[in-house]
């Protein structure tokens, strides 16, 4: 009886954490920037809202689309075996961000995951220069822990891989599913794949190698968190405002409503075929094309030195965008969220066909 009570409490705790996370989460990289800029004149708006990659509504919309697409199919049956009572793909879509501590105290499940995955914050992105033609393993900005690699591992684990080569992080089946749901959204967010690098001349550049990014002649922008657009980071703009604007234009208020709206039309989605474990790298390449559109017409206005809470100084760059940029961003965000939702369902169907 005692064991049953503990299990029920833990399950409620997990769901409560996810609900709190939907209201209070911030990305790690945005949090660093907020700390750096908190005292900067004219940047107080940065402190007004928290943000996920894609924002909680974006990730939850991805999950809601997939929930509907796999309903009544074998994939749904298999997914239910890995979810706890009351959970759905929509409700667990923010679990991977909760692991960063943005949802309050970690549950036992999250603590165990974090203990075995100390670099889990790196799983959410890759930093390929937006000008690159394709995501290439070993290229500038990639790593064995980047979003494309971790998605590949999640898919392999769900397909039954148990060897260390396919599952170097020792992910459980449930962890693989929960990461998959979230990271499918991340790999479709353009600044999680193709950020800018800036030269000492304050121009966008393509580093010749990883070693060339020395923060003297060539600087990382930390997923465009160091680009400031309309008093917030460019990364934050795409995480939150782009999706919020898309929902407002659709005249919807909830992820469920947004998912239903997006599913009324046929998805604008190139078909990806072949080995399902290779799909994430192909999606990353596709998202680089969106990253090029996200940076089209951006102009660096000036560089500013800011000090973080540790007393270290780094640079941020104020940028301007062409007229209509926000509307273009909201259209692209809606397209990417839709693709992520359909592709999440497609992966689950491919795993459990």
Image (cartoon, rainbow, N blue to C red):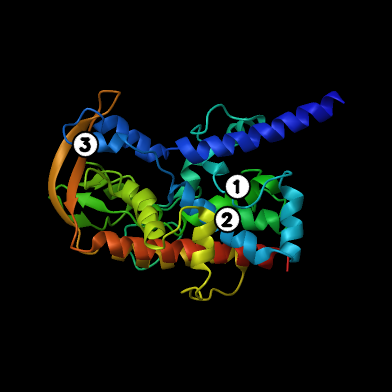
Q: Which residue is pictured at 46% across the width and 50% down the height?
A: 143
Residue at numbered disc 1: 91
Q: From the viewer's perspective, is residue 335 above or below residue 86?
A: below
Residue at far front of view? 251
Q: Position of residue 304 (x, y in %)?
A: 15, 38
Compare residues 234 and 2 and report the one nearer the observer. Answer: 2
Tell me how far mark 2 sits from mark 1, CA to CA: 8 Å
Residue for point 44% across, 48% down? 55
Q: Report helix, strand or loop for mark 1.
A: loop
Asked if the residue under mark 1 is in contact with the one under mark 2, i.e. CB atoms within 8 Å, the reply is yes
Mark drawn on residue 43: 3
Q: Position of residue 335 (x, y in %)?
A: 43, 66
Please name the residue that numbered disc 2 is placed on.
Answer: 63
In this rendering, the answer to whether 169 lies above or below 41 is below
Q: CA distance from mark 3 to mark 1?
A: 33 Å
Q: Name which residue lies at 63% across and 66% down.
A: 69
Q: Secondary structure at mark 2?
A: helix
Q: How many marks?
A: 3
């Amino acid at each position: 009886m005692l064991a049953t009570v503990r299990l029920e409490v833990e399950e409620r705790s997990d769901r409560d954490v996810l609900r709190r996370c939907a209201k209070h989460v911030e990305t790690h990289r945005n949090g660093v920037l907020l700390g750096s800029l908190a005292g900067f004149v004219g940047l107080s708006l940065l402190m007004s809202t928290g943000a996920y990659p894609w924002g909680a509504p974006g990730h939850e919309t991805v999950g809601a689309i997939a929930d509907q697409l796999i309903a009544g199919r074998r994939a749904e049956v298999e997914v239910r075996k890995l979810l706890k009572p009351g959970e759905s793909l929509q409700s667990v879509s923010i679990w991977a961000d909760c692991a960063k501590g943005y949802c309050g105290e970690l549950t036992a499940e999250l603590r165990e995951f974090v203990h075995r995955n100390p670099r889990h914050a790196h799983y959410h992105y890759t930093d390929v220069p937006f000008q690159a033609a394709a995501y290439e393993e070993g290229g500038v900005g990639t790593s064995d822990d980047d979003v494309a690699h971790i998605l590949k591992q999640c898919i392999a684990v769900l397909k039954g891989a148990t060897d260390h080569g396919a599952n170097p992080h020792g992910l459980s089946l449930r962890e693989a599913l929960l990461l998959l749901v979230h990271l499918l959204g991340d790999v479709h967010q353009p600044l999680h794949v193709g950020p800018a690098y800036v030269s000492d001349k304050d121009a966008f550049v393509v580093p010749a190698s990883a070693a060339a990014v020395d923060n003297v002649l060539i600087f990382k922008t930390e997923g465009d968190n160091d680009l400031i657009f309309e008093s917030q980071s460019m990364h934050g703009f795409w995480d939150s405002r782009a999706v919020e604007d898309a929902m407002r234009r659709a005249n919807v208020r909830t992820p469920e409503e947004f998912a239903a709206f997006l599913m009324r039309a046929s998805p604008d989605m190139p078909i990806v075929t072949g080995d399902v474990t290779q799909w994430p790298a192909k999606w990353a390449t596709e998202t680089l094309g969106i990253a090029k559109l996200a940076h089209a017409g951006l102009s660096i206005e000036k560089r500013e030195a800011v000090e973080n809470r540790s007393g270290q100084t780094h640079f941020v760059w104020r940028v301007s965008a062409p007229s209509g940029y926000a509307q273009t961003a909201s259209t692209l965000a809606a397209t990417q969220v839709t693709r992520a939702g359909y592709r999440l369902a497609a992966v689950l169907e491919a795993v459990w066909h």
